[in-house]
Image (cartoon, grey):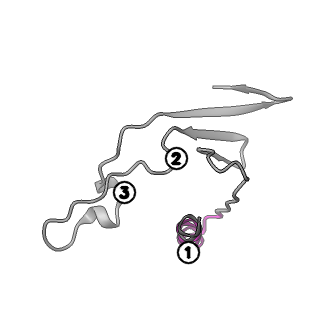
């Protein structure tokens, strides 16, 4: 769990440097794979946040090390859910 905290803190730091508010909490479920936004949206990821393939570096600098646009992703499913209130949700 220490590694996850470290990685989430690095996301928080990067967002803060760019004027984006990012907060996170561990909710105790231990295996939830979703992101809840402050606009009542939930993004459910079957893989969690582990969607990127490791970058393959043959020699020197690889743009994939720092730019997501240059990274290959693993196959995954995502569902976007909007909370309608009173416990109802719609996709």
Range of magenta residues: 7-21
> Outermost residue, left direction?
59
Q: Do the residues labelled 3 and 1 touch (CB within 8 Å)?
A: no
Residue nearest the observer in this picture, 69 or 5? 5
Gap between marks 1 and 2 measured at Cα: 24 Å
The quadrant where residue 33 appears: top right
Q: What element carries label 3?
A: helix
Is 91 magenta? The answer is no
Magenta includes 15?
A: yes
Image position of 62 with respect to 76: above or below? below
Q: Where is residue 9 in the image (x, y as percent from the top left)?
A: 59, 70
Magenta-drawn stretch, dominant element (helix, strand or loop): helix
Instruction: Kindly give the residue lying farthest to the right in the view shown.
Output: 86
**Residue of label 1:** 17
Left/right of residue 26 with respect to residue 11 in the rendered view: right
| Residue nearer the viewer, 74 or 20 | 74
Query: From the viewer's perspective, is 50 left or right of 36?
Result: left
What kind of element bears circle 1? helix
Going 58% across and 38% down the picture, which residue do you hit?
A: 44
Disc 3 designates what residue?
68
Residue, x 65% and y 40% (percent of image)? 42
- Residue 89 in the image: x percent, y percent? 73, 27
Distance CA(mark 3)–CA(mark 1): 18 Å
Which residue bears the numbered disc 2? Answer: 48
- Foreground tag (1 vs 2): 2
* Label 3 vs label 1, nearer the camera: 3
């Amino acid at each position: 769990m220490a590694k996850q905290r470290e990685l989430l803190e690095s996301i928080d730091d990067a967002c803060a440097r760019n004027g984006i508010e990012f907060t996170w909490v561990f909710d105790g479920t231990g295996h939830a794979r979703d992101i809840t936004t402050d606009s009542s949206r939930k993004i459910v990821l079957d893989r969690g946040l582990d969607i990127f393939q490791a970058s393959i570096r043959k020699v020197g600098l690889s743009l994939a090390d720092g730019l997501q646009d240059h990274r290959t992703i693993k196959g995954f499913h995502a569902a976007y859910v909007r909370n309608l209130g009173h416990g109802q949700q719609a996709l």
